[in-house]
Image (cartoon, grey):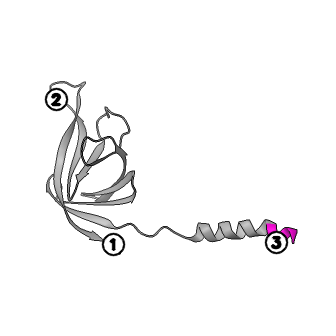
Amino acid sequence: MKYALLAAPLLFAACASSQQNPPQPTHAYGCDGAFTAVQASYPNTETALVTIPNNDGNLTYTLKQVRAASGVKYSTSKSRTPSTGHYIWWTKGNDAILYTTTSSTSRPDYVYEKQLATCTLAGVQGQK
């Protein structure tokens, strides 16, 4: 009996670890700008997985929610003043804007958000 009680938690842990999270719905956006399409999924309330088309295929970035005045804003940087090369995905309703951070040509020490694409939700795939 003592061994059965010790084995039971291991059995439950094995069963729990074999279960996988269901796939997240993918939000497809049609865009104007540097990209014509962007896909995003939201595995939890604090994370966005944003897929951007590239010449070599699609690149997926994990962005974390950051403070926003309006809508929901995600960034690859946790800093309030991110360095260059980061992505920002800012959504509000069915609209979204994709930014990157870049250095100013007139003030090299100044980093700003450069708009790459303005997007509108075209559909959601994998939604029950």
Give me the residue at 41% from left, 69% from top. Answer: 23
Give me the residue at 87% from left, 72% from top. Answer: 1
Q: How far across and down, in percent of the image, does residue 127 sit?
A: 33, 72
Q: Residue type at mark 2: give it.
A: Thr
Q: How far across and down, in percent of the image, does residue 67 sit?
A: 32, 40
Measured in 3D between alpha carbons, the distance from the residue under mark 2 to the one under mark 3, in whole angstroms, is: 70 Å
For the residues carrying marks 1 and 2, which lies nearer the camera in this image?
1
Secondary structure at badge 1 equals loop
In primary-sequence order, the first of circles 2 and 3 is: 3
The residue to which callout 3 is attached is 4
> Magenta region's main secondary structure?
helix
For the residues carrying marks 2 and 3, which lies nearer the camera in this image?
3
Q: Quarter-wise, where is residue 44 in the image?
A: bottom left
**In the image shown, does 3 or 83 lie closer to the viewer?**
3
The magenta-colored residue range is: 1-5
The residue to which callout 1 is attached is 127
Give me the residue at 31% from left, 31% from top. Answer: 81
The residue to which callout 2 is attached is 105
Q: How far across and down, in percent of the image, does residue 76 sit?
A: 35, 44
In this rendering, would 19 be left or right of 8? Answer: left
Q: Residue type at mark 3: give it.
A: Ala
Q: Residue type at mark 1: give it.
A: Gln
Q: Is residue 67 above or below residue 30?
A: above
- Callout 3: few (<14), some (14-19), or many (20+) C-alpha neighbours within 10 Å? few
